Amino acid sequence: MVKLPGVQSTFLIHLICSYILLGLVLGIQILNYPMYHLLSAPAMNQYQQHYLIREFLLLLPFMIIELVTGFRLAFKVNNFNMHSSIRADLSIILSIWIITLVFALPSHLSLLHNGLSSLSYRTLVFTNIFRVLAWTVKCWFVTKMIRPMFAYDNAYEYEFLK
């Protein structure tokens, strides 16, 4: 039987995944998307094929771990103040997944099948800006939870430590 990590270990995994994902989507927004205009139509198609596979393999595991740890924290933390922050964090995660599945992924697929159209490109860049902002706010929320999550001296207030 696999033993699940405790709340604090789950929180650390969640925190690390959140910051990794923020760094990745920020890097994609700043480094990758601006270079799309430099590619010819055939090169864009070939690039998108390779890019989507690599992006999928890089981002998806971290996004799944972040989602699972977010749900685990939401169900394990009993303190009302912490629970509100964790629920806000989980809401942001779900929003990121919706933006990704409804807008970003179809835009990437459109670029793959139709080449670099201005609408697909603008949609992709615009939705990724929302993802960057969402992960930035999410990381701010999670960072604010570090002290309460590890406040052993005030275990009464944070009853999930019991």
Image: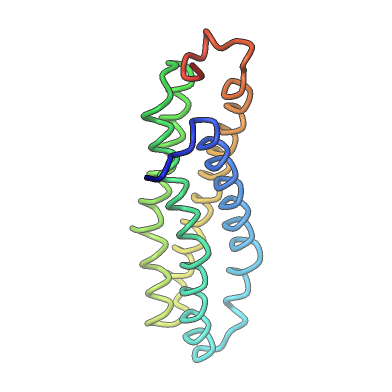
Q: Quadrant of residue 32?
A: bottom right
State the residue in front, 53 or 110: 53
Q: How many marks?
A: 0
Which residue is painted at 45% across and 41% down in the image? Answer: 69
- Residue at figure coordinates x 39%, y 65% from the top left: 105
Where residue 114 appears, as percent x and y from the top left, is: 39, 82
Residue 27 horizontal side relative to residue 1, left or right: right
Above or below, comparing residue 3 to residue 25 in the picture? above
Q: Is residue 91 visible?
A: no
Can you tell which quarter of the image residue 155 is in? top right
Residue 61 in percent (x, y) is at 47, 58
Report the front residue among 8 and 130: 8
Is 119 on the left-hand or right-hand side of 157? left
Q: Residue at x 52, y 72 (%)?
A: 54
Q: Report the side of 54 relative to 109 (left or right).
A: right
Q: Is residue 122 visible?
A: yes
Q: Quadrant of the N terminus?
A: top left
In this rendering, is residue 46 above or below 146? below
Q: Residue furthest front?
A: 1
Vertical comparison of 116 with 7: above or below: below
Residue 3: horizontal and vertical position, in percent? 43, 40
Which residue is drawn at the image coordinates 43% and 71% (left, top)?
Answer: 108
Q: Residue furthest bottom?
A: 42
Image spot of residue 97 (x, y percent): 39, 51
Residue 97 higher or lower than 57, as above or below: above
Q: How is the image coloured?
A: rainbow
